[in-house]
Amino acid sequence: MTAEPVGAAFREPPSGAAPPVFYEPSSPASAEIEVRRSRFIAGVRKVSSPDEARACVRAERERHPGARHVVFAFLVGPESSETAGQSDDGEPRGTGGRPVLEVLRGSGLRNALVTVTRYFGGTKLGTGPLARAYAGACRKALEITPRAVFRQEKKYRVRAPYDCFEALKRVFEDSGCRVENEVFTEEASLEVFIAEGEEGRVLTAAGNILRGRGEIC
C-alpha cells in the first residue's frame, strides 16, 4: 500500500481530508515498564501477514533468551477483513495476549504486531495486576509509535514477455506498488497491488511497456 506519513501516534489527518482506511506503524517503537522487579519490554512493528508476525515473535525470543515470556498480539488488514492473533505464552490464560490485543485494537493501528517480553522479577503478580502490566507496557509503546495513513489497494495479475518484465516491474516499484508472487514459466507473471486512485497512471505506464504483448487483469 501507499503510505502518507502523518507523524507521531494518534495524530489526526488534516481537517477536510478524506477519512483513512486505516493506520499502520511507519517505524518500530519500544517502551519498558517495571512492576515489582519484573521488566515488561514492549515492541511495536509493522507486519503484513500472520506468518510475518509469528516470525518476528520467534526473532524476539531469540533476542531475549533469558526472558520468561514473550506475549504478543497482532492485527493485519482493515477492520472489515482483519486477521487477529494473540498468545499468553505460558502466562495464566487471558492475562497477556488478550489485554495486549485490546489495547492494540483501541489504538486504531492495523498491520501491527505488539510483543511484550517479560523478565520475571521473582514475585508473582496475580492475574489482575499481571494483565494491567502487559496492557500498560503495550499502551506506553503505542503512544510513541509513528504511524502512517494508508489507502485501500487493488490487486492485478500481470503476464509479460521476459524481455520487458524487468522494466514493467520497475514501473510498479517506482510507483510505490507492492509486487508479489512472481512466477517464471514460458512467460513471466506477477501480482501487483496498486493504491486506489493511482490505477490509471500506473496501468497506462505499464501498458506503454507491454504494447499488447502481455495481459493485466
Image (cartoon, helix red, strand yellow):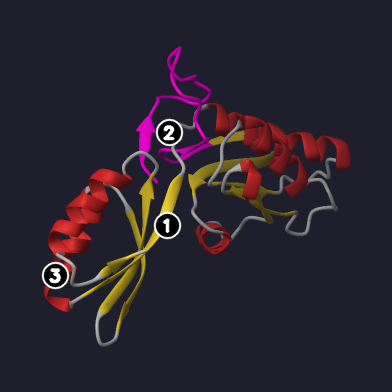
Between the residue at mark 2 and the residue at mark 1, the CA separation in whole angstroms equals 21 Å
Q: Are marks 2 and 3 in contact (CB under 8 Å)?
A: no
Q: Is residue 206 above or below residue 44?
A: below
User: What label does residue 148 carry, if any?
Assistant: 2
The residue furthest top is 15
Could you say which quadrant of the image residue 108 lies in?
top right
Identity of the residue drawn at 56% across and 32% down: 142
Q: Earlier in the sequence, mark 2 or mark 3?
A: 2
Q: Main secondary structure of the magenta part?
A: loop
- In this image, 162 relative to 113: left or right? left
Name the residue that disc number 3 marks. 164
Residue furthest to the front in view is 212
Using the numbered discs, state the Cα–Cα distance from disc 1 to disc 3 in whole angstroms. 20 Å
The mark found on residue 38 in the picture is none
Type of amino acid under label 3:
Cys
Residue 36 in view (yes/no): no
Disc 2 secondary structure class: strand
| Circle on res. 155 | 1
Q: Please provide percent x and percent y for residue 133.
A: 73, 36
Pick the front one: 85 or 57? 85
- Label 2, label 3: how far apart the Cα atoms are: 33 Å
Q: Which dot, 2 or 1, sits closer to the camera?
A: 1
Residue segment shown in magenta: 1-30
Going from N to C along the chain, the mark reached first, 2 or 1, is: 2
Q: Is residue 175 above or below residue 10?
A: below
Query: Is 21 part of what is drawn in magenta?
Result: yes
Q: Say which amino acid is labelled 2.
A: Ala
Q: Are marks 1 and 3 in contact (CB under 8 Å)?
A: no
Q: Where's the C terminus, which quadrant?
A: bottom left
Q: Residue furthest bottom?
A: 186
